[in-house]
Every structure is written in C-alpha cells, then in structure tokens.
Image (cartoon, rainbow, N blue to C red):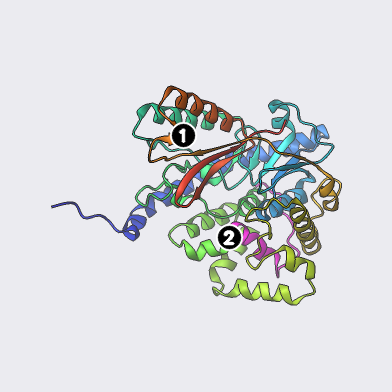
Amino acid sequence: MPPIEKSTARQEKSTARKRKKNIIAAFEKGMSNDVKRFKKLKEEAEESGSPRSIVTNGDIDGLVSACLLHSVTGWKVKAIVWPNRKISLHPELKIESQEQASKELFVVDLFSPVIPGVSNHGGLWGGKKIAGKNEIKEKFDAFDQKLIDQSEDVMCASPNHWIGIKGSYPNKAEDALSYRYGYRMGTAQVLLAMLEAADLKPKLYDAEYLPWLIANCDGGIGSFSGAPENIPMWWSALATFAGPSSYSQQIYRLVGESPVNRFREIDNALRSEENTDLDGALNGKWNLNHQAGTTNLQLCYTNVRVVTEWIDDISGWGDPFAGEVSGIDKWEVEEPGHVERLISPKDGMHEGIEIHSPQGLQELDRDLDRVLKSISYGYFTLNQTSYMFGLDPWW
C-alpha cells in the first residue's frame, strides 16, 4: 500500500515549530550582528565627514525605506534602480571599483553581496539538484558558501539571508527553509525595526497614513491575512526585536487587530483629500503606478517625485534625494548587464545549451561569479518557474 501523502495544511503545521525556532535564531544572531554593523557604518561616516550614498530600488518599498534611512542618517539617494533595470545616477556619484562602492555606497531594498545594505531579498540556493547532476549541485553549494563567506565581511541585512532560505525550493511545504516560508514583507518593516534596535528611532508625526504606508510596503497587509501560516511569525519577531514600545510593535498590532477592510477605508480617506497628483502616482494598494514594470522613465520620475513630496509633508523626514527629487529627471541613465538564469530547467537546458555540457558548465561558472559581484541579487518566480537574477555594477 503506497504511503499516504500529507496535505499542505498538515505539512505547514508540521514545520511551524521548526520555523519559529529558525526565525528567533536568525534575529538573535543575524539581525543583532547587522544592527551593530549599521551603527558602526554610521559612526564611521560621521567621523570621516563622508556620508554614504544610497542606492535604492525604484518602487514604493525602496522609496519609503530611503526616506526612513535619510531621516536618521542624513544620507542622500544618488542612484535609483528602476523596474526596467536601468539606473539613474546623480552626476556627483563617481564610482570606479567594487572596493570604492563597498566603502561609499549603501543599498536599500536591493540585496548585494558586495555593498552593505538592507533588503527583503537574498537567500541561498539550497542544494537542489538541477537535471539530476551532482556536478551542478556542487557548483551551487560552492556559490552558497561564497555568499555566506562574503556576508561575513559585508552587511547583507536580509531576513531571508539570516535564516538561510532556499531559493531552489520555491514551494516545498514540508521544508521549513523553503522559499514558501521566506520573509514576504517589505524592506521598510525590517529597516524600521533595525533603526529602532539601534536607538535611531525615526519620528512618526503622522498616525493616520504613515503607519499603514510602512505596513503595506511590498503587500505586507495582504500577506498578513493571506499567508497566516507564515507572515505573522515573521512580523511578530520583528516587532519583538524592536521592543515593546517601538513603532514596529504598534504597526504589527495595528495590522493584526484591525478589520480586514480597514486599509481600504484608510485609502478612501486619502483619496477624499485634494490629492489629484497623488491619485495618479499611488494606486489603491499604495504601490507606485509604474511598479509592475515600465520602460517609461518619465512616468517613474513623476511618480517618485509626487510620492516623495507627500511622504515628506506627512513625516517631516526631508527629501532624501541629492539635489532634491524634482531634479532626478536630469540624472544620467545607465543600463548595465544582468544575469537571469532559469534555475530549475526540466529539460536540462539553459538558453539552448545543455547545462551539464562543458560549455554549459563554463557559462554557469561565469553567471554565478557575476551574481556574487552584483549590486542586486535574488530569486523570482514567473509562471510557476523560478529564476536567479543578478544586476551587474554600472561602473
């Protein structure tokens, strides 16, 4: 008689205890270490009189996170990575090497193995075989180890990295480290908790919209109710780490104790104000209207300007962009190369080449090396197929 397979719900419950233990350990070690690293980076920048330049993702999570970071450090955004993978660079930003980038930049809502920063991305490969080949698995195992080793020297603050989430297992319910159980909220929630733990608590003057804006970065509110087996665990740990009187704790309770339609009511209240420009820049889920991907950089510039000015008005955090947000349309635009690999090809092919052939193995080595030097690295899923992504440096 064949064994009876467990239901997904039973598999989720069977991993719950292990997942809680993993999350607690990740925060006690990983987050604690990176809070200390961040405080040291800030102190070094103040002592040298050379503030770091922020490289941020051009979506709502990157924008809110950059505003938060600027409010307590005074650091300015000098580079923006857009959804179409182009990068806008402030004319004053002159980076010529990886060593210089590591010393002068700080990435926000981008996971880089070579530049310190904070994000909700990252994660390891995790050991899954590709096309049943041990030789390829060994290469990815080596990649994971190099990523771990590099993060010993570089602040790669990401819950998925702290815990060792496996990008190669996107939906494995019985594995406590499957990407299914990864951190699926925004960078803003992580950054706020880290700042509070570092005694750099930003001011939240506005209690009507700002807590909801932070909470819903990268769909945090929807994830809370949509993935009850996972997200509340992460959010509770974040709030606990930040402390009982923290904004992180208040926001966690706000989301957990509010009726499911409360966010819609908040959005309706915002729309009832005279916010004509904001209506066009911020959609009903409070994402930037270009966030799904666009080649129209003028739309990106407008949306970022409108939402940045709104955030500044309700927070008092200041304009985080070098030379003011109104001038980002004058910045230089670069289009660096990128790696995008299908990480679980059922037919053992990548771009028409057998991945276990000599040429395929050579190209795999090349791509993994590029990812380890990238300014933005992670996994994404499209049509139930997983990909590894790495954005090359622009210098």
Q: Is residue 287 above or below residue 66?
A: below
Start and end of the magenta stretch? 198-219
Circle 2: residue type: Gly
Left or right position of 203 against 358? right
Q: For mark 1, does the 10 Å Cα neighbourhood hold few (<14), some (14 to 19), or many (20 or more) residues?
A: few
Which residue is label 1 attached to? 352
Q: Nearer the viewer, residue 350 or 101?
A: 350
- Place residue 318 in its image quadrant: bottom right
Do residues under tags 2 and 1 come within 8 Å of each other at their CB atoms? no
Q: For mark 2, does the 10 Å Cα neighbourhood hold few (<14), some (14 to 19), or many (20 or more) residues?
A: some
Left or right position of 50 against 264? right
Q: x%, y% of residue 7?
A: 30, 59
Left or right position of 316 against 244? right
Q: Residue at x 49, y 35 (%)?
A: 351
Residue 216: say if magenta. yes
Which residue is farthest left?
Answer: 1
Circle 1: residue type: Gly
